[in-house]
Amino acid sequence: MEPVALEQRLQEWLASRPGLFDLQRTSEGVRLVEVATGKALKLLAEQVLELETRRNSLSGAPYLLLRLDARPTVALADAGFVFDLDTRNTGAIPNAPPAMSFRDHRKLFRHLQHLLGSQSDPEHRREALDVAMILIASLDGARALGLSTEVEEGELEAMIRRLEAGG
């Protein structure tokens, strides 16, 4: 895809969603910044294979799917960047969502914090382990896309240490 065409398609889609992403032109493509988190994704025009508008099957909300060469697919949605979970380090995770955003990650992280406060209940401890695995896979998915995850990884590592310590 040509850099100008990529920028134009993204601008058209983002025009009806002000404040969601900041689009910056680069010499080879664009840099998209998720305003809510400051997370940035550099898109080289030559690596963007396809842009397709779709609708969320549950909410009906539109999102823009970007198929990339040599990187996982990413969607731009009202939740921000939406990326697939990468389960190479965790193995299959039953009942995990196929994709998450950083907003989803933050909500699930807060749930993990709540669960850690009540680890004496064996069911809460098991659920905390499952949630931690989903959070690991979500960060692995974001990292595979090229998004920064250092802050979230540090926070999650602290929670995992608490989980391992039993509280």
Image (tube, rainbow, N blue to C red):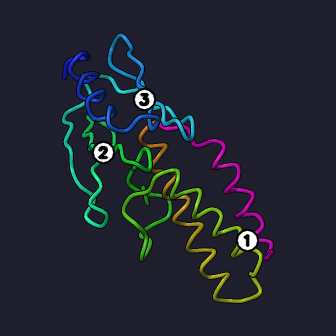
Q: Between 58 and 121, which is closer to the camera in this rendering? A: 58
Residue 67's quadrant in the figure? top left
Q: Residue beneath label 2, please?
A: 73
Residue 37: percent from left, percent from top: 57, 40
Q: Residue beneath label 1, please?
A: 163
Q: Between 16 and 93, which is closer to the camera in this rendering? A: 16
Lower position in the chain sequence, tag 2 or tag 3: 3
Residue 18: percent from left, percent from top: 41, 34
Tag 2 near tag 3, CB within 8 Å: no
Residue 128's quadrant in the figure? bottom right
Lower position in the chain sequence, tag 1 or tag 3: 3
- The span shown in magenta is 147-167
Q: Say whether residue 108 is left or right of residue 142.
A: right
Q: Say whether residue 91 is left or right of residue 109.
A: left
Mark 2 and mark 3: span between their CA atoms?
15 Å
Residue at 43%, 43% in the rendered image: 144
Q: Amino acid at mark 3?
A: Leu
Residue at 43%, 70% in the rendered image: 96
Q: Badge 3: how crowded within 10 Å, few (<14), some, or many (20+)?
A: many
Q: Badge 1: how crowded within 10 Å, few (<14), some, or many (20+)?
A: many
Tag 2 near tag 1, CB within 8 Å: no
Q: Amino acid at mark 2?
A: Thr
Which quadrant would the C terminus be assigned to in this image?
bottom right
Instruction: Let me know if residue 160 is in the magenta part.
Output: yes
Depth-wise, is mark 2 or mark 3 nearer the camera? 3
Q: Badge 2: how crowded within 10 Å, few (<14), some, or many (20+)?
A: some
Tag 1 near tag 3, CB within 8 Å: no
Label drawn at residue 32: 3
Q: Amino acid at mark 1?
A: Leu
Depth-wise, is mark 2 or mark 1 nearer the camera? 2
